[in-house]
Amino acid sequence: MGQQAINLRDKLALLSEQWSPRVIAEMNDYQLKLVRMEGEFIWHDHPDTDETFLVLEGRLRIDLEDGAIELGAGELYVVPKGRRHKPSAREEAKVLLIEPRGVINTGREHGARTAQNDVWI
Amino acid sequence: MGQQAINLRDKLALLSEQWSPRVIAEMNDYQLKLVRMEGEFIWHDHPDTDETFLVLEGRLRIDLEDGAIELGAGELYVVPKGRRHKPSAREEAKVLLIEPRGVINTGREHGARTAQNDVWI
């Protein structure tokens, strides 16, 4: 960890692709990641961990099997461990994710939407 | 964890005292806390854990033994485990803290500035 402030806006400007979380910081064995989301993601879950979504810009919808969460800028939601969810955004949302190191964006649903993990910006 | 968005601005409005972190969410055994900081805190460290400071409003300075970090809104810093630090703010800063459940605000330096822990808003 470098001895300097990490500026979210500066780091967001470095995200070249949507749906590809990039690590900006680590705290113990947790990572803070930024991701640009637009359109529909896939249904998936993370069987071993909760996952925090904090919306920085735009609006994010998180469909759950029994409802949906709508998040605007400055709002967060913690998806509980094992809960199937599907993020989507009609227009691009910029999101801070917080979760343990090693979490794959598509959970157990490996496939075309699976992003390379543990890439720093 | 309730099935609804957590709005940072709404939660900040509920903070009645400075230097008293209040929990707004849990992710596994980690907590997200909001705190209003103004003036000088005490030097302390957390021997067992890193600690993340994300400034939401205002400016925060974190003195370290070998330098200082200046954070504006939208900037974060992870104080490494065991590193002595002293937060301060000339005008009030509103800050999101992320750290494991059970972390005391003054670390090993219990005293007048030690806030009640694990209080939710």
Image (cartoon, coloured by chain):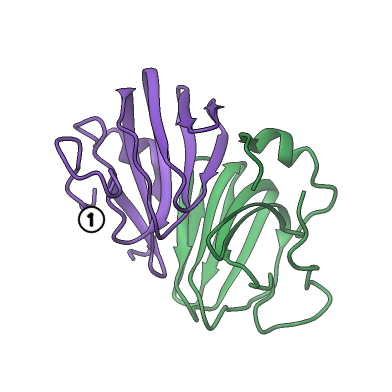
Chain colours: A purple, B green
Q: Amino acid at mark 1?
A: Asp
Of residue A88 and residue B40, the one placed in the foreground of this image is: A88
Residue A5 visible in rendering: no
Residue A6 visible in rendering: yes
**Position above or below: A91 against B121:** above
In this view, the residue farthest toward the top is A90
Mark 1 residue crowding within 10 angstroms, few (<14) / some (14–19) / many (20+): some
Of residue A24 and residue B118, the one placed in the foreground of this image is: B118
Question: Chain under label 1?
Answer: A
* Mark 1 secondary-structure assignment: loop
Q: Quadrant of residue A92?
A: top left
Of residue A102 and residue B61, the one placed in the foreground of this image is: A102
**Position above or below: B105 against B109:** above
Q: Quadrant of residue A35?
A: top left
Q: Residue at x 68, y 70 (%)?
A: B105
Residue B84 location in percent, x, y? 54, 78
Q: Residue at x 17, y 48 (%)?
A: A116
Residue A8 location in percent, x, y? 40, 41
Q: Quadrant of residue A86?
A: top left
**Position above or below: A94 against A11:** above
Residue that label 1 marks: A118
Residue A12 location in percent, x, y? 32, 36
